[in-house]
Every structure is written in C-alpha cells, then in structure tokens.
Image (tube, rainbow, N blue to C red):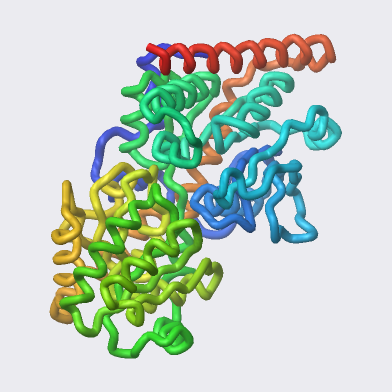
Amino acid sequence: MRRSHELCLGAGSIQSQRVQDVLRLPGSEVSGVLGVSSAMNILMMTNTFTPFVGGVSRSVTAFAQECRNAGHRVIVVAPVFDGMPESEEDVIRIPAIQDFNGSDFSVALPVPGFLSSHLEQFKPDIVHSHHPHLLGNTAVRIAARLGRPLVFTHHTMYEHYLHYVPAEANRLRQFVIALVTGYCNLCDRVIAPSRSVADILCERGVETPIEVIPTGVDVKQFSRGNGQGFRRSHGIPRNALVAGYVGRLAPEKNLAFLADALCTCLADVRRGRFLVVGSGPSGNEIRDAFERAGLGTRLHLAGPLDGQDLVDAYHAMDVFVFASQSETQGMVLTEAMSAGRPVVALDGPGVREVVQDGYNGRLLEDASSVDFSSAVAEMMAAPAPRREKYKHAARETAKQFAMARCARRLMDVYEDLLKQQPSGPKDESLWHQAVEEVRSEWELLRNMAEAVGQALK
C-alpha cells in the first residue's frame, strides 16, 4: 500500500494558493443533485457522531447527506452515545464506553463479527475512515478483506489532545504523530481539510496522495438568522457589542487565553458582551475568569446549539473570536462568515486559509492576550462603512467553502479511486478475504510497532 513520496500531493491536489483559488473547481457552481456517473455504496466509519457536538461529527453528517442527495447510499458506523436518536436510518451503532477519562467522548469497544452481516448485504464500494484508531483500524480491516479503496480524512491534530491521556508528553506526542503518519500510508487516499495540514502531513512522511477538501458550509442556511430575537431570549441588550465563540469548551481550544483576552477587552468596552456557544470541561474555567474580573453579568453561556438556534446565535454576534491553534480547518470560521461576521483569530493551521488579516477580520501572529483584546475592541469600534466592508468580505470568503463544491470534490475522489480498481471479477472467496484480513492486521501491528520505536528513540 505504500507509495513514493513524489505522490504526496496527488494529481487532483491543490498547490499553495490564496483561499479564493483553492476551492475554485471546474463546474463547481452547482445546485441540487450533484452530477456523478453512477450510484456508490459508501461506508463511513467515525469515532464521533451525533448527538456529540464537534467538527468531525458535523463533517461526517454533512458529507453523508450530500452524498445521499446525489443518489448514493451511505452507511455511517459510529459508537453509541448518550442521548442518541432511538431510530436512525443507515447508521450502525457500536457498543462503547461513555465519557472516556472524564471527557465527553465515547470509545467504541471491539466487537468481532458485529458488522459482518451488515456488510454482506451492503457491499460497500468505498470505505471512508474518519479516525486513525479504534473504528479507523476496523476500517482498514474491512477495506482489505473486501478489496475496496480506503479513504482517510485527517480531521484532527491528535498531538494536541494528549491531556486526555495521562502519560509522558513528549514520547506520547512522537508516538501519536508516527502512528497517524503510518495510518495515512495504509490508505489509498488522504483528505486534508486545509493546505496547512497537507503540508504538515507531507513533512511528516505521508506518501499516500493527499487531496485538500475542507468541510463545506451551508451558506444559505447560515446567512439567514434572527440575531435580535436571540439577544432578547438570552438577556443580551439590543445595543450591546457582542464578541462570540462557538465550539467545544475544551483545553485544546486555548480558551484560557481567549477568556483572559475578552476580560481585558470588556473592561474597556462598556457595552461589550461575550457570547459562548458550546459545552465541555472548560466552561467553568471561562465562568471563573469572568467572575474574578467582576464581569460575570457580561458573560453569556448559551450551551450547545444546533439548527436555527445556532444560526441565530451567529447573527447575535458583532465579531467572532477564535484562539485555537489545534485546528485542521475550523468549520465555525466559515459558518460565522456565512452570517457576515468578521473574525479575530490567532494564526494556525486551518485558520490562515480562511481569515485574511485586514480583509475579512484580523489574523494575529504570536499575539499576547492584550494584542488580541485590542484587535477585538478595534473591530467593535469600527465605523459603519468599515464594518460593512468586513461583513461583505466575510460573506464572499464563505462562498468559496460552499458545501456543494466540497462534496462534489469528495465524490470525484471516490470515483477516481474506483476507476483505478482492477477490471474483471473480484476474488470474493472466503480464503482470499481471510488472507487479506491477516495482511491488514499485520500492517496495523507493524504500524503500531514502528510508532512505539519512534517514541522510544
């Protein structure tokens, strides 16, 4: 399965360009059903899915729906989560440990043979893994056993999540990087949500062809919201100047920095408020920071939102703020921009492809919390013509990330891989499947051993 390094950026991959050019795809102005040559059966395997709120879950949901709209059948395999719907169509749930290590994640348990009967009926054409471990390993085994192409989307910079696992940090970081790099090289195609991530993967030794495909945004949905209605229902004054954040409230999102910067900003901006949408272990940390600063009444913790409530929350903001440097894309940035909200953000992978300093917001390099605070205050105090210019630029940027464009690109990748499949009848004998499954198990074990070796150097 391993490829030469020259193939790291595949024939359809994007070279370094401005964000406006990255998604300007031939024939990308589409609506309704996306044109593809034939219906495909697509198996998506993810460790996070609804009702869990997060970027991966939303990405899987969005791409699966677009593929279904285009006439394909998609089955999603995901762990059991508390509060999940009682009835789901084309979703297979795997037994899982809830709230792993104090987080809000579910960890799928290995259940040999659990998927076999489903796969015999479904017969996937493409296996798409959304994680490099747990159900991601199952995806490798299934693709090998059935002789189907394996696609992997590198959603997350996993080395930024090590605080969830008590261990020696530096060696564990090297292990995680090596494990994920090796996993990428077990796949037939890797999807990177941004050019920054694609560059990092190449530098780390990924040889599998990489395609840059962000998770798209439903621009029309997020462009229409009732911001004033949201403010009324959440006790935010009509004339307040609102900075807002949407996302998981977790340490990897750099929320201590963000809370400190917003406290500094709101101490000087008398009409300023901070609206936080999301849930997670860092919620109390934000609340405590505002209480210590004597600004508790100017913090609004709305909890997790979706649907029109989420759209209305974006429209209740005057500026969107984002301090995470652990992103691969930052979907919330394009959602905020679809609502016409400029962004103040720290520079980082997946962020610099969206936020252009001085055009649709402020992108700050090596910023202190004071610098960040000043940028937010500057955005809030901007005269009306300048604010309108920022809003227009934000909406124009969001159009480049329209979901239809991104979904079409992903389906093109699927079709390209299927065209590369050997012609003629496949060997579907039980003996052949057993041999391929043993081969895949060996590859997974070898990848694990090599990752351990890298960590112990």
259 with respect to 376 (left or right): right
263 with respect to 89 (left or right): left
Residue at left offset 32%, top offset 66%: 289
385 with respect to 293 (left or right): left
Rendered location of residue 318, percent (x, y):
29, 75
Q: Would you say residue 399 is visible in this rendering? A: yes
Residue at left offset 33%, top offset 38%: 195
Residue at left offset 81%, top offset 34%: 114
Tell me which corner region of the image, top left, top right, bottom left or bottom right, holds residue 76: top right
Q: Would you say residue 74 is visible in this rendering? A: no
Question: Which of 64 and 243 lies nearest the eye of the viewer?
Answer: 243
Rendered location of residue 194, percent (x, y):
36, 41
Tell me which corner region of the image, top left, top right, bottom left or bottom right, holds residue 201: top left
Question: In what quadrant of the picture does the N terminus appear?
Answer: top right
Question: Which of 164 and 365 lies nearest the eye of the viewer?
Answer: 164
Question: Which of 178 and 397 lies nearest the eye of the viewer?
Answer: 178
Rendered location of residue 139, percent (x, y):
65, 29
